[in-house]
């Protein structure tokens, strides 16, 4: 992801599309995407840590995640851009995604 502009890429959870990348942060320790969910989550944006990205297809302009739509929806609420610089908020988002099940082969 570092050095790549992913703005506008479609973001896919394991069970469907969640939205498009609105912006990204490549700062070490705070790397994430802000994804505009459109009408899926009532016009809200969600913050996605890069650690849950499982693939980037630059030709298809698509990013795949290792989580479901419901897991993204249940993540700590993203309200304002200032949260993208708040270590406490970023820590809570990171902790949430780290706790998700890793094995999806059942």
Image (cartoon, rainbow, N blue to C red):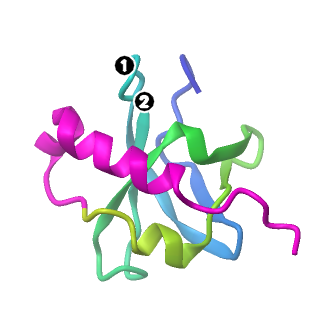
Residue 18 part of the magenta segment: no
The location of residue 10, given as percent across then percent down, is 59, 57
70 lies left or right of 40: right
Task: Report crowding for label 1: few under 14, some 14 to 19, many 20 or more residues within 10 A (C-alpha).
Answer: few
Decide: is 65 above or below 29: below
Cβ–Cβ below 8 Å for labels 1 and 2?
Answer: yes
Residue nearer the viewer, 41 or 10: 41
Residue pictured at 49% horizontal, 57% vertical: 20
Q: Quadrant of residue 42?
A: bottom left
Task: Report crowding for label 2: few under 14, some 14 to 19, many 20 or more residues within 10 A (C-alpha).
Answer: some
**How many marks do you count on the picture?**
2
Residue 94 part of the magenta segment: yes
* Magenta region, residue range: 78-106
Decide: is 90 above or below 80: above
Residue nearer the viewer, 17 or 74: 74
Q: Quadrant of residue 28?
A: top left
Residue pictured at 40% horizontal, 74% vertical: 74
Q: Which mark is residue 47?
A: none
Residue pictured at 58% horizontal, 57% vertical: 11
The location of residue 101, given as percent across then percent down, is 65, 62
The location of residue 100, given as percent across then percent down, is 57, 61
Q: Quadrant of the C terminus?
A: bottom right
Query: To which residue does mark 2 refer?
Result: 31
Whether residue 32 is visible: yes
> Element type at marker 2?
loop
Residue pictured at 35% horizontal, 50% vertical: 93
Q: CA distance from mark 1 to mark 2?
A: 5 Å
> Element type at marker 1?
loop
72 lies left or right of 22: right
Decide: is 26 above or below 12: above
Query: To which residue does mark 1 refer?
Result: 27
């Amino acid at each position: 992801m570092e050095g790549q502009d992913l703005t506008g890429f479609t973001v896919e959870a394991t069970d469907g599309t969640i939205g498009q990348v609105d912006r990204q942060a490549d700062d070490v320790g705070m790397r994430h995407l802000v994804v505009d969910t459109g009408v899926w989550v009532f016009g809200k944006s969600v913050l996605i840590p890069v650690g849950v990205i499982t693939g980037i297809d630059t030709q298809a302009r698509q990013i795949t995640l290792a989580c479901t739509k419901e897991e993204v929806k249940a993540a700590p609420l993203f309200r304002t851009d200032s949260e993208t610089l708040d270590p406490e908020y970023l820590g809570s988002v990171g902790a949430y995604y780290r706790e998700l099940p890793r094995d999806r082969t059942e």
